[in-house]
Amino acid sequence: MLAPHLPFPRIPDAIPPDLDEGADMQVGAVPFRWRRGELRMLLVTSRTTRRWIVPKGGQMRGLTDRQTAAMEAREEAGVEGYVFPKPLGTYLHTSHDGTRPVRLFALEVLRQRPKWPEKHQRERRWVSLAEAQALVEPPLAALLARLPEVVGVAR
């Protein structure tokens, strides 16, 4: 069960304020876990270009951004877990249909399913922070650098 959504102030990031307001915002999750004291994150491929990305999608009516992030992680990566309340931040994602802001939340993976809705459309891969930053687009790579600060120390 997700904790209730709480209002959070807009955190400083690379998104110009005029683009953030009223833009076609997407919401995503950065699924992560700790393995032998190392922070690992889960990337998935996009369906069209096969580039490495994080699970994300459009904001959903009736769901909080945290709930949407959890749903996207479940559908696109087959993982479930705890969504941190404070967003990692927002970055600009460019795809075949334009550029839009994406607000990301850290999601600590508590369950990884062998089957999930988009399994046959995507690959998933557990990687280190450095590997993730080398695989994803630069604006996302910069935002991923905030993950250790947000999630704390290894458990």
Image (cartoon, rainbow, N blue to C red):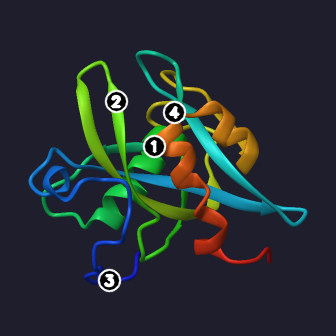
Front-most of 16 and 99? Answer: 16
Q: Are marks 4 and 3 in contact (CB under 8 Å)?
A: no
Q: Amino acid at mark 2?
A: Thr
Crowding near pointer 1: few (<14 within 10 Å), some, many (20+)?
many
Q: Give the image location of residue 38, x and y in percent.
A: 83, 60
| Count of all numbered marks drawn on residues in the image | 4
Real-space CA distance between mark 1 and mark 2, rounded to the nearest whole angstrom: 15 Å
Q: Amino acid at mark 3?
A: Pro
At 52% from the left and 63% from the top, the residue drawn is 106
Front-most of 57 and 135? Answer: 135
Q: Amino acid at mark 4?
A: Glu
Residue ID for mark 2:
94
Residue ID for mark 3:
4
Marks 1 and 3, the one that precedes in the sequence: 3
Q: Are marks 3 and 2 in contact (CB under 8 Å)?
A: no
Q: Are marks 2 and 4 in contact (CB under 8 Å)?
A: yes
Question: Residue 137 has which mark?
Answer: 4
Q: Which mark's residue is nearer the viewer, 1 or 2?
A: 2
Q: Can residue 79 be seen?
A: no
Marks 4 and 3, the one that precedes in the sequence: 3
Q: Which mark's residue is nearer the viewer, 3 or 2?
A: 2
Quarter of the rendering containing residue 36: bottom right
Q: Are marks 4 and 1 in contact (CB under 8 Å)?
A: no
Q: Secondary structure at mark 2?
A: strand
Q: Give the image location of residue 121, x and y in percent.
A: 48, 22
Q: Secondary structure at mark 3?
A: loop
Residue ID for mark 1:
55
Crowding near pointer 4: few (<14 within 10 Å), some, many (20+)?
some
